[in-house]
Image (spheres, rainbow, N blue to C red):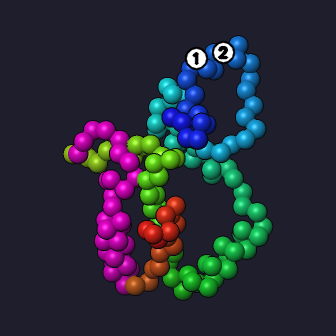
Amino acid sequence: DEVNNLTFILSESSLESFDRHQILITSYDGVITTASTPCIKYIVKHSEFLSSLVPLPYIRDVVAEVKEKYFSKYIMIGIHYRFHDVEQDWAVVPPVPGGTPIAQNFGEGATVEDFIATMMKIQSASSNQCRFFVASNSDVHK
């Protein structure tokens, strides 16, 4: 896959051409993996990488301020709605049980309306004791 002439999925042959030397990538701007890496393995490894990141002190301060201002008296539930971006994403969403057996794009399995319906059920079941923090790559869908 190429975006603006940058390749994010490396073929095995391109790695072999480096004569088995270690490769250091000095600029990380997107997803870098090999074509033969199973989707689930990539997601797990990428998740491990993201989990290892530590926020800077000013980011921790902003998070603490938001939590105190909007969630101090409520159960905070984080929602991440990923909108499919054709320039950066490919089909990685696991298929819905009983549905088509192929991966889907973000937004094809669970729609915004599905998220809203589930959030309303949770809100009702909690006797309005929870609030949602919605994060998304799409301002329109927040």
Closer to the camera, 44 or 137?
Answer: 137
Residue 78 in view = no
Looking at the rendered structure, the kind of residue marked 1 is: Ser
Q: Residue furthest left?
A: 98
Quarter residue 19 falls in = top right
Residue 32, x across and y down, in percent: 60, 36
Neighbours of disc 2 within 10 Å: few (<14), some (14-19), many (20+): few
Considering only vertical position in the picture, is 40 above or below 106?
above
Label 2 near label 1: C-beta < 8 Å? yes
Considering only vertical position in the picture, is 15 above or below 101?
above
Residue 62, x across and y down, in percent: 69, 74
Residue 78, x across and y down, in percent: 50, 68
Neighbours of disc 1 within 10 Å: few (<14), some (14-19), many (20+): few
Looking at the rendered structure, the kind of residue marked 2 is: Ser
User: SS at mark 2?
Assistant: loop
Say how many tags the image has. Answer: 2
Task: Kindly identify which numbered label has been placed on residue 17.
Answer: 2
Residue 72, x across and y down, in percent: 58, 84
- The structure residue drawn at horizontal position 56% and vertical position 20%, both measured from the top left corner, is 12
- Residue identifier under label 1: 13
Cα separation, mark 1 vs mark 2, equals: 6 Å
Segment colored magenta: 99-127
